[in-house]
Image (cartoon, rainbow, N blue to C red):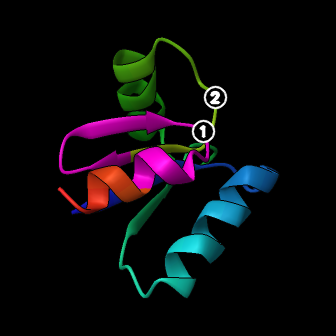
């Protein structure tokens, strides 16, 4: 299961969503501007509120790092 934590004005968030769409990978998106629960989760897991944050079956990736994302997806 893939969950991405985003904000509407984040360019890397948009790039991440486009990247996953292009690879036909399904994901759930949580907008930090609309969910206090999502904000708390990101802060607990990363110590910051930077976006995007991707959770791939428990592997948490900060930023739009294609290599790490592909590696976690292919596990």
List x then y, in percent, for residue 9: 82, 52
Q: Nearer the viewer, mark 1 or mark 2?
A: 1
Residue at point 59%, 24% (across, down): 49
**Going by the image, does 74 lie left or right of 14?**
left
Which residue is more in the foreground, 4 or 22? 22
**Circle on res. 63:** 1
Judged from the image, the secondary structure of the residue bearing numbered disc 2 is: loop
**Circle on res. 50:** 2
The residue lying furthest to the top in this view is: 47
Judged from the image, the secondary structure of the residue bearing numbered disc 1 is: loop
**Going by the image, does 13 lie left or right of 9?**
left
Residue at point 59%, 44% (across, down): 52
- Proximity of marks 1 and 2: CB atoms separated by less than 8 Å: yes
Q: Is residue 72 magenta?
A: no
* Crowd band around label 1 with a 10 angstrom C-alpha radius: few (<14), some (14–19), many (20+): some
List x then y, in percent, for residue 17: 59, 69
Residue at point 26%, 39% (across, down): 59
Place residue 37 in its image quadrant. Answer: top left
In the image, is residue 54 above or below residue 36? below
- Give the magenta part as a residue range: 55-69
Q: How many marks?
A: 2
In the image, is residue 1 above or below residue 5? below
| CA separation in Å, label 1 and label 2 | 8 Å
**Going by the image, does 49 lie left or right of 43?**
right
**Circle on res. 36:** none
Place residue 74 in its image quadrant. Answer: bottom left
Residue at point 43%, 19% (across, down): 46
Quarter of the image with the C terminus in it: bottom left
List x then y, in percent, for residue 26: 35, 79
Which residue is more in the foreground, 70 or 50? 70
**Going by the image, does 69 lie left or right of 21?**
left
List x then y, in percent, for residue 69: 42, 52
């Amino acid at each position: 299961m893939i969950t991405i934590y985003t904000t509407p004005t984040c360019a890397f968030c948009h790039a991440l969503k486009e990247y996953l769409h292009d690879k036909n990978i399904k994901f759930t998106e949580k907008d930090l501007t609309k969910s206090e629960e999502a904000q708390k989760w990101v802060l607990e897991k990363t110590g910051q509120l930077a976006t995007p944050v991707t959770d791939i079956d428990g592997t948490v990736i900060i930023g739009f790092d294609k290599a790490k994302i592909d590696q976690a997806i292919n596990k």
